Image: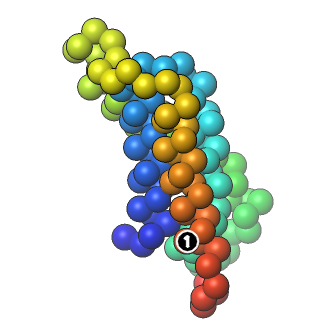
């Protein structure tokens, strides 16, 4: 597991927090957009796209669908944990899951854009 993947996990943890908090579902779309940005700059994902012969424009629609699915799944996991308790299990404002995911996205961008050997 490389550093951008760890930060990607932080992005999805923001979605789990969103589900556990019971906030509105529009947060999934925002977190999925952050996950798409992190995936685009992930060197491992970039290398896999190059090996498959796909440009970013060809791969982007499926990246978006994939990240919406993963963010939704993480959100539903958090919601599933909160469901037996009759609502949210943590009382957080809507910005906390978004900030956690934004920190994960910023870390993935920083790790993915650092100079080094190109894939």
Residue 100 in percent (x, y) is at 49, 44
Q: Residue at x 33, y 12 (%)?
A: 87
Of all residues shown, which one is farthest toward the left?
84
Q: Residue at x 69, y 49 (%)?
A: 61
Q: Quadrant of residue 114?
A: bottom right
Identify residue for label 1: 111
In the foreground, 82 or 97: 97
Residue 21 percent across, percent down from the top left: 40, 23
Q: Is residue 79 above or below residue 66?
A: above
Residue that protrudes farthest toward the right in the picture: 57
Q: Residue at x 53, y 52 (%)?
A: 103
Residue 53 visible in the picture:
yes
107 above or below 16?
Answer: below
Q: Quadrant of the C terminus?
A: bottom right
Instruction: Report if residue 46 is visible in the image.
Output: no
Does residue 78 appear left or right of residue 94 in this picture? left
Single out the residue that lies furthest toward the bottom. Answer: 117
Across and down, in percent, residue 37 comes to 65, 55
* Quadrant showing the N terminus: bottom left
**Does 2 sit above or below residue 6?**
below
The quadrant holding residue 18 is top left
In what element is the residue under mark 1? helix
Q: Nearer the viewer, residue 69 or 75?
A: 75
The number of callouts visible is 1
Q: Position of residue 47 (x, y in %)?
A: 58, 77
Name the foreground residue: 112 vs 98.
Answer: 98
Crowd band around label 1 with a 10 angstrom C-alpha radius: few (<14), some (14–19), many (20+): some
Q: Is residue 28 above or below residue 35?
A: above
Name the residue rendered at 54%, 41% in the picture: 99
Q: How is the image coloured?
A: rainbow
């Amino acid at each position: 597991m490389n550093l951008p993947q760890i930060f990607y996990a932080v992005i999805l943890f923001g979605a789990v927090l969103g589900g556990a908090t019971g906030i509105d579902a529009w947060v999934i779309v925002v977190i999925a957009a952050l996950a798409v940005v992190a995936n685009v700059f992930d060197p491992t994902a970039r290398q896999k796209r190059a090996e498959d012969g796909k440009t970013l424009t060809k791969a982007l629609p499926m990246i978006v669908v994939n990240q919406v699915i993963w963010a939704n799944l993480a959100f539903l996991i958090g919601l599933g944990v909160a469901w037996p308790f009759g609502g949210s299990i943590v009382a957080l404002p809507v910005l906390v899951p978004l900030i956690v995911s934004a920190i994960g996205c910023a870390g993935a961008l920083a790790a993915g854009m650092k100079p080094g050997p190109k894939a």
